[in-house]
Each structure stands twice: as C-alpha cells, then as structure tokens.
Amino acid sequence: MAISKENFLLVVVALMLISCSTLSLAISDVGPFVVVHKKVSLNRLKSSGSEQVSVSIDIYNQGSATAYDVTLTDDSWTPDVFNLVSGNVTTSWERLDAGSLVSHSFVLESQVKGLFYGAPAVVKFRIPTKAALQEAYSTPILPLDILADRAPEKKFEWAKVRTIRKISFIFIHVWN
C-alpha cells in the first residue's frame, strides 16, 4: 500500500505538532531546578598565625515547583587541616519554594600551610513525583593557598602618592 505525498506530509506535520505539544508540556512541568553557588574568602589572622576560611553557599530554586527535604552537605574540609569556628558544614530546610533563595555560611580556621582543593557542596532534595532523592552540586572553588607567602600591600605608598598629588593640586591653584 503506497502513501501519497499529501498523506505523508499530513502525517509528518501531525507528528511534529504532537511532539511540539509534548515538549511544551515537559518544559512547563520542569519541577524544581536547584542551582548552588559556593563562595570562599580567606582572612589571615596575624595574632594566631592562622588563616580563617569563610564559606558562603547560596541555593536557588529556579524551577517551577517546590523542592522538599532540602539538605546541604559541604564536608570536604578535612579535620586534620581545618577547625570549625562557627556554623555547621551541613544544614537542612523543610522546603525550597519555586523562585526562592536560601543561604548558609560557616567559618573554618587552618594553621596548616599549603594548597587545598575543595570539593563542591552537595544539595539533596525530594520531588513528590519521584521516589529517589535528587542531587545538585555547587560551583567549584579555586584552589586555596592557605598561609601563602604574599607580598605585603603598599597601602602607605598609595596614601603618600595621593597626599603628594593633593598638595601639588592645592599649590598650583594657590600659585595661579
């Protein structure tokens, strides 16, 4: 049985319309879409000869549905290198509504000099329509050079240059 060109064209167009409508339904029912951003900053403590590591993690739900039983774990900070000063490396929330943001932070301290490569934080959450927990990983961090030898900042040099420029400017205006 041969299909005419017109009938074949109608079948192809019908299949395209069906697939487009299925795709639009799938896109509109994305569910939770969790994005995790991890930031780290270092602060040298001259009094104790250690370095403080401040960690901040933002969790965004950019999807169209609520994520439930949200758990954040950032346990790549080895206890033989880092001591927890404040906060916790794990925390949880009952729910993360669509379009919302939660933040978590903690502070660590290290007296061990060297390069440290941190792993991404892990966020696990539940979607009511799926039995298995879903996972999202944070953005990676750059390697941390703990207690690195850094060239001293020249804050006084900048102040001196600015002062000389101000005096020169005042002198020129008074002279004219």
Image (cartoon, helix red, strand yellow):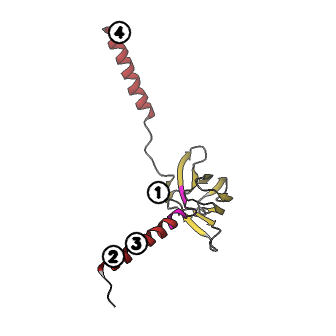
- Whichever of labels 4 and 3 marks the residue nearer the N terminus, that label is 3
Residue wearing tag 2: 9
On whether residue 32 falls in the magenta region, the answer is yes
Q: Residue flagged by tag 2: what amino acid is it?
A: Leu
How far is the residue under mark 2 from the one under mark 1? 55 Å
| Camera-nearest residue between 111 and 129 | 129
Provide the secondary structure element on which disc 2 rests. helix
Q: Relative to 111, say whether 172 is above or below.
A: above
Alpha carbons under labels 3 and 2: distance apart: 11 Å
Please tell me which of labels 1 and 3 falls first in the chain.
3
- 23 relative to 63 in the view: left or right: left
Structural distance between the alpha carbons of marks 4 and 3: 80 Å
The kind of residue tagged 1 is Leu
Q: Position of residue 150 (x, y in %)?
A: 45, 47
Q: Which residue is denoted by mark 3 in the rendering?
A: 16
Q: Tag 2: Cα neighbours inside 10 Å, few (<14), some, or many (≥20)? A: few
Q: Amino acid at mark 4?
A: Val
Q: Which mark is residue 142?
A: 1
- Evaluate if marks 3 and 2 touch, with contact meaning CB atoms under 8 Å apart: no
The residue most toward the right is 94
Q: Which residues are magenta?
A: 26-37
**Quick one: label 3, few (<14), some, or many (20+) residues within 10 Å?**
few
Q: From the viewer's perspective, is the residue at label 1 or at label 3 nearer?
A: 3
Query: What residue did someone put label 4 on?
Result: 174
Q: Position of residue 14 (x, y in %)?
A: 41, 74
Q: Secondary structure at mark 3?
A: helix
